[in-house]
Structure formats: C-alpha cells, structure tokens
Image (cartoon, rainbow, N blue to C red):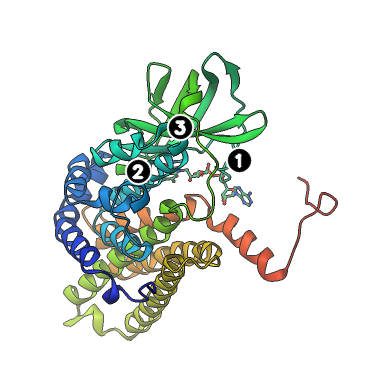
C-alpha cells in the first residue's frame, strides 16, 4: 500500500481522531491564556486527549497501539498548538518519551511501558543537561557502576511536564557511551523550580536533580535506530506552525475589528502586503512539512534531514508572523489581555527547543556546502 500524500487521503480512523482533537482544541484555546498566566499545566487537556484515543494512536502497531501516521501526528500537534502550544509541547515530549521507552526497552521489559501508556500514565523526556546544551543526545554526565545498575548524580533541565510524569526517559554516559534508561522518579529525584519563563509557560519545563539515582539494569534501553517512531522531531515543527496559525488568526481579527479614521486596519495597504507575504510563506512551510511527513510515512530516509529544515523554517515563520501581529496590534496588542503578545512569547520558544535554529542552520549549511569536519580543521574556541 502506498502512503497517503495529502491529509484528505488519510485513513478514516485517523481523520476521525483529528476531528475529535479539533473539537477538544476549541475548549483548550478558550483556556490557554489563563494556564499561561498561571504557568499551570493543563492536566485536564491531557486527560481528555488520552480518553479521545491519542496515546493509543501514537503507539506503533507492533507495540500494541494503532500506529498513527506521521502526517496525522503532525496535524494533531499543529491543531493542538494553535489552541494551546504548551499542551502541544507536553503531548510531543510525552509521546516521544513513552513510545521511545516502549521501543527501546522492549527486549528487557516486553510490553510494560506500552501498557502503561495505554493505561494513561504520563512520560517526560529528561535529556538536556547544563553542559550538553542543545546537544541533548550527547550526555556529558557519566553514571557510575553500582549494584543493580548505575548511579546518576547530576541534573537534567527544561523537562516539560516533569511534575506530572510517572516515568522519565533519561540518558547518561555508561562506559563513555550515551545510554538510555527508564527512571521511575523516587526521593532521589527532586524538582528545582526554575520555570518562570516568557513563553510556553504552561509546560512547566523544570530542572531535575538526580542524587545518586539508580539507573536500573533492567530499565536500560537499546540505542534509537532508523524506523523508530520519531515523535519529537515530527512534533517540533508542528508546534511552531500551530503558533503561527494562531498568531495569524489574532492578527486578522484585530485588523478587521479595529477601525482607524473610519476604516478597518485591514484596508491599509502595508498590512495587506505584509499579510500576503507572511501567509504565503506559512502555507509554503506547511506544504514542505506535510511533504516531509509523507516521506516519513513512505519510509524514505531523506525525511530526517528534511524535518530539520521544516523545524528551522517553522520556527522562523512563527516568529515572523507573531512579530507582524505585534506591529498590526499596536499598543492594544501589547496589552496582557491580548493574545497577540502571548503568541510572540510562545513563538520565540520554538527556536530555543533543540535543535535550535542556530544549530540547525549549521547542520543544513554544512550539508549544502559539503563541509566535512576533521580534527585538523575543526574550529576551536
Ligand atoms: C519550552 C521548552 C521546553 C523544553 N522541553 C524539554 C524537554 O521536555 N526535555 C528536554 O530534555 N529538554 C527540553 N528543553 C530543552 C531544549 O530542548 C534544549 O536542549 C535546551 O533549551 C538547550 O539549552 P539552552 O536553551 O540553555 O541553550 P544552549 O544550548 O546553551 O544555547 C545557547 C545558544 O547557543 C547556541 N548553540 C548551542 N549549541 C550550539 C552548537 N553546537 N552550535 C552552534 N550554536 C549552538 C544556541 O542556538 C543558542 O543560541 C526544552 C526547552 C524549552 C525552551
């Protein structure tokens, strides 16, 4: 069977799920400002998404789920991000950690983590470290051998949804090699409450401290490999695209609703030109993203490097649209009560999440230019 190349061609079950998510998202959008203001995780959103079948759908069929296509997953995250990007971010990280743990520990744990996901348990990705920065797959913290596994003494930072997580996907160096583990948070794992941010406030992406936490031998996972469902790389561009959609919708509302000297702002030519440019570029990035997800569904290997391009473009267009919103919104869009300022704050966060636009630009640029680093020509600080 060939993979669908358009959202209209998705199987009926996936289209039904997307319809259910779109229905729920209307309610999420109405509450998103309040959760952002309070920096509070919208736990109820996550519960109803589980009940709507999202977790079962995200789990691949060979792990006991129904196996959502990349295209449907990307669309689900985009719909959620347009309504409440913090919910979309937690869903992306939770899906990545849960499916990752189910996949990576299958040999040792069988279907345990898959069953826990299906039962509604929550997962979080505790990968980023202070010294690894954006290179979250290159942990710098070495775990030391102990009875039953290895001990981790260190920190993981910006762990979205960590306060409600039943399980953490953690990486550390074991004998010099990056190694993945499942960790059930116990008294050795404490939350350092740093999360008071400009944007994506309701993700509560806290700093976690591990004080000689046992990384259990039986919870050690294999390394990720091609063919594993890449929820986080597929979700990150969709988060920024959803934020861009929301920013554009707020801009249009404002331009149509506000009259200056008897005419709506939308009649001003500079706004028409800027909106034409922003909306056309947003459509183009969306089309590229969808094409990339169709490549992923078809199992074409180029999808991975194109997901980097999609994230790079989506992060940038979200900031561009949100900045235009602030210009069109004027001082009224700058008020806390306006969604326009919230979209700008949220759009900025997309660029920071790994890999950042700077890191991606380096990767893409090197690929285009055919630059191969060797120890001799590597730049040194
Ligand atoms: C909202 C949000 C949610 C997150 N959720 C999670 C999560 O659930 N789990 C998790 O593990 N992590 C999460 N992160 C962490 C994130 O993915 C990054 O790993 C982390 O933000 C990187 O650290 P830093 O922002 O301090 O940036 P740094 O990596 O210190 O970067 C600072 C600057 O240096 C640049 N830079 C960094 N490295 C390079 C390089 N190699 N080459 C060129 N430039 C470079 C960056 O682009 C940036 O401009 C989240 C972050 C945010 C903002």
Q: What is the secondary structure assignment of the residue under circle 2?
A: helix
Q: What is the secondary structure assignment of the residue under circle 1?
A: loop
Q: Is residue 283 above or below residue 246?
A: below
Query: What residue lies at 35% left-to-right and 74% top-to-bottom?
Result: 4
* Pointer 3 local density, CA inside 10 Å: few below 14, some 14–19, many at least 20: some
Say which residue label 1 marks. 138
Q: What is the secondary structure assignment of the residue under circle 3?
A: helix
Say which residue label 3 marks. 108
User: CA gap, disc 2 to disc 3?
Assistant: 21 Å
Say which residue label 2 marks. 94
Query: Quadrant of the image for the C terminus?
Result: top right
Total number of numbered labels? 3
Mark positioned earlier in the residue sequence (1 or 3): 3
Nearer to the camera, 29 or 288: 288
- Spot occupied by residue 170 in the image (x, y as percentages of width and height): 48, 33
Left or right of residue 368: residue 56:
left
* Pointer 1 local density, CA inside 10 Å: few below 14, some 14–19, many at least 20: some
Q: Quadrant of residue 361?
A: bottom right
Q: Is residue 9 above or below residue 81?
A: below
Nearer to the camera, 287 or 312: 287
Residue 17 seen by the camera: yes
- Spot occupied by residue 320 in the image (x, y as percentages of width and height): 42, 67
- Spot occupied by residue 178 in the image (x, y as percentages of width and height): 60, 36
- Spot occupied by residue 129 in the image (x, y as percentages of width and height): 54, 35
Left or right of residue 38: residue 136:
right
User: CA gap, disc 1 to disc 3?
Assistant: 24 Å
Query: What residue lies at 22% left-to-right and 42% top-to-bottom?
Result: 42
């Amino acid at each position: 069977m060939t993979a669908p190349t358009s959202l209209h061609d998705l199987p009926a079950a996936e289209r039904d799920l997307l319809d259910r998510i779109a229905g729920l998202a209307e309610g999420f959008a109405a509450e998103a400002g309040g959760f952002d203001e309070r920096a509070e995780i919208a736990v109820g959103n996550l519960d109803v998404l589980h009940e709507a079948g999202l977790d079962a759908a995200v789990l691949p069929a060979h792990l006991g789920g129904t196996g959502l296509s990349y295209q449907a997953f990307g669309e689900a995250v985009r719909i959620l991000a347009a309504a409440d990007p913090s919910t979309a971010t937690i869903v992306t990280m939770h899906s990545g950690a849960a499916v990752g743990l189910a996949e990576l520990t299958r040999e040792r744990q069988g279907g345990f983590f898959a069953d826990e996901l299906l039962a509604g348990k929550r997962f979080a990705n505790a990968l980023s470290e202070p010294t690894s920065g954006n290179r979250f797959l290159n942990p710098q913290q070495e775990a030391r051998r102990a009875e039953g596994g290895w001990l981790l003494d260190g920190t993981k930072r910006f762990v979205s949804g960590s306060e409600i997580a039943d399980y953490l996907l953690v990486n550390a160096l074991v004998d010099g090699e990056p190694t993945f583990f499942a960790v059930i948070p116990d008294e050795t794992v404490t939350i350092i409450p740093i999360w008071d941010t400009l944007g994506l406030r309701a993700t509560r992406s806290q700093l976690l401290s591990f004080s000689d936490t046992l990384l259990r031998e039986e919870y050690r996972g294999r390394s990720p490999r091609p063919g594993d469902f890449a929820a986080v790389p597929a979700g990150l561009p969709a988060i920024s695209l959803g934020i861009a959609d929301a920013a554009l919708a707020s801009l249009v509302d404002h331009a149509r609703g506000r009259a200056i000297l008897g005419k709506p702002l939308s009649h001003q030519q500079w706004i028409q030109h800027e909106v034409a440019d922003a909306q056309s570029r947003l459509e183009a990035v969306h089309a590229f993203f969808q094409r990339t997800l169709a490549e992923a569904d078809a199992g074409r290997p180029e999808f991975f490097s194109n997901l980097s391009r999609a994230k790079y473009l989506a992060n940038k267009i979200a900031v561009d649209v949100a900045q235009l919103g602030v210009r069109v919104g004027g001082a009224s869009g700058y008020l806390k009560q306006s969604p326009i300022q919230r979209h700008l704050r949220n759009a900025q966060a997309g660029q920071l999440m790994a890999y950042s636009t700077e890191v991606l630009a380096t990767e893409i640029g090197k690929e285009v230019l055919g630059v191969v680093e060797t120890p001799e020509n590597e730049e040194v600080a």
